[in-house]
Amino acid sequence: MVGGNWKCNGTKESIETLCASLSTLELPSDANVEVMIAPSSLHATMTRSLLPEVYQIGVQNCWTGKGGAFTGESSAEMIKDLGIDWVIIGHSERRHLPILKESDETIAQKVAYALEKGLKVMPCIGELLEEREAGKTNEVNERQLKAIADAVTDWTNVVLAYEPVWAIGTGKVATPEQAQEVHAHLRAWISDNVSVEVAQSVRILYGGSVSPKNCEELSKQPDVDGFLVGGASLKPDFITVIKSYE
Ligand code: PEP
């Protein structure tokens, strides 16, 4: 699976132009890749109408529960009602931006509620640079993953994204070996703590400065089942990244 996270970017005009380019994507009928684009919530419906069905649409966040007096938020029910299938939850920018600071618990609540309402969820986990340098990569990812795993009863609609924070938007991509090492560790954790079946079937995406230049090598790693792409998904050659999993 390849996801594109457009973050807080886009105008009507730039999205029309980008969608026209992305619409040229042709995949063979037996293509082995799902594609999901997550524009801003404001642009989700427009993007749905501009892209062919081969693209699934997601948003980048949702509220923790049922809607109501929560100014500025969007509930899982609203997202579903608009025909949007996916929601990214717990992106590092939501975990670490000082005014957002989403906790593991908040993220777990969002995952549970979005799944209950029938959305497909893409929870994100990943360590900060200082945590990696302190030898805490596995500890941090296990803690974040445990909070999510405790909120999931059925993994069918869950695709996990491992996104080391030091690689996001920095141009400093993890090496294929670094990505593989963490992905294998996460899969082993899932095998030990959830089930062998879920460990085998759940897709674990890598995110962090993936581009048309580095996607080929990363895609060859046995436990890297796809990508979540930020900056490079705003450009027409995002198609090259998708095709690395064709
Ligand atoms: C992201 O936003 O999820 C991401 C991985 O960003 P980038 O590809 O720009 O590093």
Image (cartoon, rainbow, N blue to C red):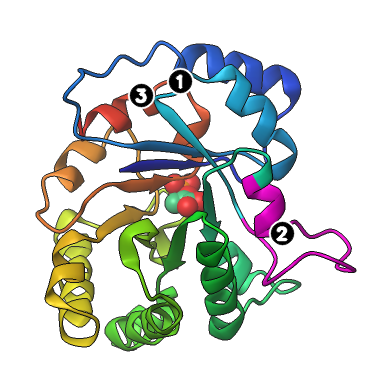
State the predominant SS element of the stretch in magenta: loop
Relative to 165, is 246 on the left or the right? Answer: left
Of the two numbered discs 1 and 2 on the same chain, state the one appearing first in sequence: 2
Residue, disc 3: 239
Amino acid under label 3? Ile
Question: Is 28 inside the magenta-drawn segment?
Answer: no
Query: Could you tell me if residue 167 is visible in this image?
Result: yes
Relative to 99, is 117 on the left or the right? Answer: left
Of the two numbered discs 2 and 3 on the same chain, state the one appearing first in sequence: 2
Amino acid under label 1? Pro
Amino acid under label 2? Ser
Which image quadrant for residue 38? top right
Give the CA distance from mark 1 to mark 2.
31 Å
Residue located at (44% from left, 38% from top): 36
In front of the other: label 1 or label 2?
A: 2
Q: Few, some or many C-alpha atoms within 10 Å of disc 3 (few <14, some 14-19, many ≥20)?
A: some
Residue, disc 1: 236
| CB atoms of marks 1 and 3 within 8 Å | yes
Label 2: which secondary element: loop
